[in-house]
Image (spheres, rainbow, N blue to C red):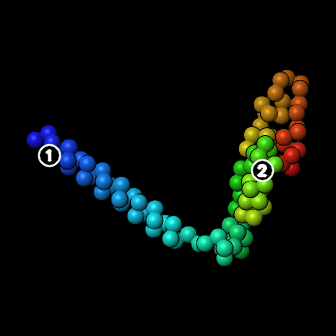
Amino acid sequence: MKGLHRLGRRRRTVMVGLSAAAVVAGVVTLLPSSAGAAALGTQAAPSGRYFGTAVAAGKLGDSAYSTILDREFNMITPENEMKWDTTEPSRGNFNFGPADQIV
């Protein structure tokens, strides 16, 4: 009887896996192709909204990262570069370099 119980569990697992794959495939087909689609920030602008992301100063040198930022977003927020522990790593010692990179 244990063998039959395991077989039923395997079938459920396979069915759930196939259902998830079908959902993912459906979502992928609903997404616009990157060739003719307007940037996300451009699509948000007519409704008076911004579309932004968090930005890491250390990744600004990566051309693919910067290209996506420039193309898709019309607002950015520093990830950690303007947080207290980054701007003042020790009492009285200030470092605004990473924040300045983003600004």
Q: Nearer the viewer, residue 92 or 28?
A: 28
Rendered position, 75 above or below 9: below
For badge 1, the amino acid type reads Leu
Q: Which mark is residue 62?
A: 2
In screen coordinates, is 97 left or right of 76?
Answer: right
Residue 65 pos. (x, y %): 74, 54
Q: Seen in the image, is 97 located left or right of residue 12?
A: right
Q: Residue at x 88, y 38 (%)?
A: 96
Query: Reading the chain from its start, which is encountered first: label 2 or label 1?
Result: 1
Q: Work out whether residue 49 can be spotted.
A: no
Q: Which residue is mark 1?
A: 4
Badge 1, how many Cα within 10 Å: few under 14, some, many 20+?
few
Image coords of residue 28 (percent x, y): 51, 66
For the residues labelled 2 and 1, the Cα–Cα distance comes to 54 Å
Residue 47 placement (x, y as % from top left): 69, 72
Q: Residue at x 24, y 47 (%)?
A: 9
Q: Quadrant of residue 85?
A: top right
Q: Residue at x 30, y 54 (%)?
A: 14
Q: Is residue 62 visible?
A: yes
Amino acid at circle 2: Asp
Residue 40 placed where, x, y %?
A: 68, 67
